[in-house]
Image: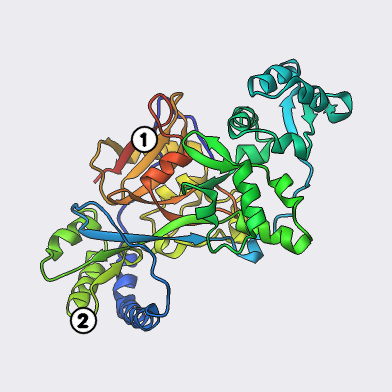
Amino acid sequence: MHSFSPPAFVFLPCRNNQFPHLAHAIARLSFVILLLVFFASMRAGAEDRSALPQNELYSCASGPWGRVSYYYFYLEAPDYVVEKFPLPSTTTKWVFDITEFDQIETLLKSAGMPQERLDQILSPRRVVKDSQHAYVFPSATDLENLTPENRAIIYTHLARSPANAFQYSPVFFLTDSVEEWARESGLSASIISKISSLSYKAGNALVFSDIPLLLSQAENVAEARFIMRKLTRVRTLMAQLELSQDDSIPDLLNYWSTGLGLRQKELEPLMRAILQTKGLSHLDILHLMPPLPRKLLYTYPDISYTAEGRLPDCHWTSLNFFNLNPQPFLLDTRLATSLLKQDFDKVEPPYRYGDVLMFITPDGRAVHSATYLADDILFTKNGSNLLTPWLLMRLQDLCKLYDVAPGKVRIVGFRHKK
């Protein structure tokens, strides 16, 4: 998660929300190939669908985007990505600023920790100090005796510092329970139970931070790596547009081409081909997105991105949505902010396809941004590391992740000037 501090508050703009003429030419030349691939995938999917378990299908609210439905599924970072990260220590360490050392006992007391356990945790043999930090090493028993409420108080404080990596960037569960998140994950019942017992609330989200303690439960290195891969498990969704003879294709094209005709010449024959093909009635939202997000969706950043000195984040993702080729300068939040001022207008709901929604703190920092697609579905990347993929998510889930609430984070919409 990266943030920037604009003068009042601003968002990062796209350089140009229309594809260059060359892009249109390439798209027209490749459309026949795209159509053939699309129908081949549809036929293959139809053949295999009967053998697969059917996920529950949800319907979006009606609107100018047409009839959109979606189902949830989970992504996990592939092994080649997880293997780039060394297994962390199985010893839990809480890091405090040295200037607040005298306040640690008060904090732990306010969290409901009994004096006997406080004395053990803060005993000289369990605390290490240097010129900047105080390091506290709670035992497994100390951690397991914390209630979710105790843990929330302590870990919310620890999350203020990136030095407490597991509290600063916890594992988020967008489901109502850990058990639901872990269904069909392959994790053992004992590990799922341990995660559940150690989870707590951060804002409105259920989260988990005690990764060192969890890894200490692994029987061997292979299981520890398996657990780490499963902790990258994130819920996303696949959305589709339903088409029928009763739909107004011009109206749908107007919405999905931003009212400016972007890719309309490519989208119209695809929509009409579906209407004219027996047995087909749905178009994956993926095919309605511009080339760059279509390429990135459901993937993880390649290590080659590090050549720019910084990995893509949410703002890079939002502002490059309509660009045929990603603009590297959008990794610089200062330049991105200036581009917003120049090329974007603030807009109120209802939002439309391609609008950028910025999540802004009371002090004016944009802690996240995402691109609006339809109803409450957005295209997003939640962080700037190799373990966070490009996803489709519902707005209500992003609100949980970024603590959107009155007096906290608010959402502001921006639209590229025509």
Q: Dot 2 lies on which element?
A: loop
Q: Position of residue 212 (x, y in %)?
A: 73, 46
Q: Position of residue 305 (x, y in %)?
A: 58, 57
Kindly tell me whether residue 247 is visible in this rendering: yes
Question: Compared with residue 47, is residue 309 higher up or lower down, i.e. above or below?
Answer: above
Q: Which residue is mark 1?
A: 411
The amino acid type, in three-letter code, at marker 2 is Thr
Q: Dot 1 lies on which element?
A: strand
In front here: 330 or 132? 132
Q: Which residue is mark 2?
A: 277
Question: Compared with residue 168, is residue 322 higher up or lower down, i.e. above or below?
Answer: below
Q: Position of residue 174 (x, y in %)?
A: 47, 48
Q: Position of residue 30 (x, y in %)?
A: 34, 76
- Give the side of residue 86 with respect to residue 321, left or right: right
Mark 2: give few (<14), some (14-19) or many (20+) Cα within 10 Å. few
Kindly tell me whether residue 83 is visible in this rendering: no
Mark 1: give few (<14), some (14-19) or many (20+) Cα within 10 Å. some
Give the residue drawn at x 70%, y 59%: 84
Question: Compared with residue 407, is residue 142 higher up or lower down, i.e. above or below?
Answer: below
- C-alpha gap between disc 1 and disc 2: 41 Å
